[in-house]
Amino acid sequence: MVTSVIDRCAAPGGTVRMLLLPTGMVAPTQRTIPDFVLERPVTAAEAVAAGATRGAVYAQGCSDLFARFREGLDCRTLVSLERVPELGAVEWDGSTLEIGAGVDHHTGSHDARVRAALPGLATGWGSIATQRIRRRATLGGNLMARRTRYEMSVMLGALDAELDFLTLDGTVTVPPAALWDRAEPPGGLLRAVRITDVRQVWFGYERSMRPLMTVAAAVRAGTVTMAVGSEYTRPYTVGAPLGTDPTEIAAALPEAIGDAAGSARYRRHVAAVLLGRLLERRTTGEESRR
């Protein structure tokens, strides 16, 4: 059972107010947020129990939360995760890297264990967002927001990461792509991201063509895995034997990577160029020196 129900937040008297913009559009403000209960659990088990209720929303860094409220988020119970210490853990045993969902971008990208295990991931992670956002936004929030402009799912897709969700019935593990298909367990709490056999992995990330496209590449056991994303389309992942021409690897990307901002043909070309740059970095050892 959750140990505390702190307070109830609402517009005064429950009144819903709207803001009329100069453009004539009506947009919600913080004052339009309906009543919700704020829960502050201190363990992951308590958080899951609170999150299993109808209309429950998990929150930690909250850098994306108010945008979701303005977009009409239906929140009846807000489950704050800031007092759940296990979500902020980072573990590295020399083979498997596990990063808690509550680790913020700044802390994670500077963590000595992350840098030792996957220096390319630390570099890529440290390059996203602004300094203000990096200090608050968390790994879990970046993933669970499911916004195409957020970049961690691209990097983790290339790394074949595993996402551990806690539910009332136990732990469920899914790949990053499951988030875009909404195949994670309903009400599940993302506990951690796990990357296995790290000693066998080289990783690099290219975002110089953002917002049109970002490319992550991982080399593991003679295989290249490339994940591509953009501000407008969900990430897609393809793989091929190491040594395959980048153009051939990019040709396997689906037509769905194309949109009004760039055709699938053009995006495949960009992906091939960026992948070629990443593989050249691997050959020269440039990424490991960053």
Image (spheres, helix red, strand yellow):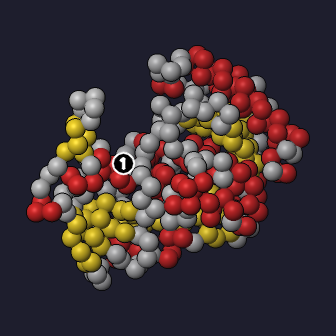
Q: Please, is residue 164 above or below residue 41 in the view?
A: above
Q: Please, is residue 9 above or below residue 4 in the view?
A: above
Tell me: 189 left or right of 140.
Answer: left
Tell me: 68 left or right of 35.
Answer: right
Location of the N terminus by quadrant is: bottom left
Residue 146 in view in this figure: yes
What residue is rendered at 50% in x and 21% in y?
261
Q: Quadrant of residue 157?
A: top right
Badge 1, how many Cα within 10 Å: few under 14, some, many 20+?
few
Q: Position of residue 116 (x, y in %)?
A: 76, 63
Q: Please, is residue 228 above or below residue 59 in the view?
A: above
Disc 1 secondary structure class:
helix
Q: Position of residue 242 (x, y in %)?
A: 77, 36
Q: Residue furthest right?
A: 284
Closer-to-camera residue (184/36) = 36
Closer-to-camera residue (73/269) = 73
What residue is rendered at 66% in x and 48% in y?
127
Tell me: 247 left or right of 211.
Answer: right
Task: Tell me the kind of residue under disc 1.
Answer: Ala
Q: Position of residue 283 (x, y in %)?
A: 86, 39
Residue 139 in view in this figure: no
What residue is rendered at 27% in x and 49% in y?
29
Closer-to-camera residue (27/47) = 27
Residue identified by numbered label 1: 67
Q: Position of residue 211 (x, y in %)?
A: 56, 32
Q: Please, is residue 201 above or below residue 172 in the view?
A: above
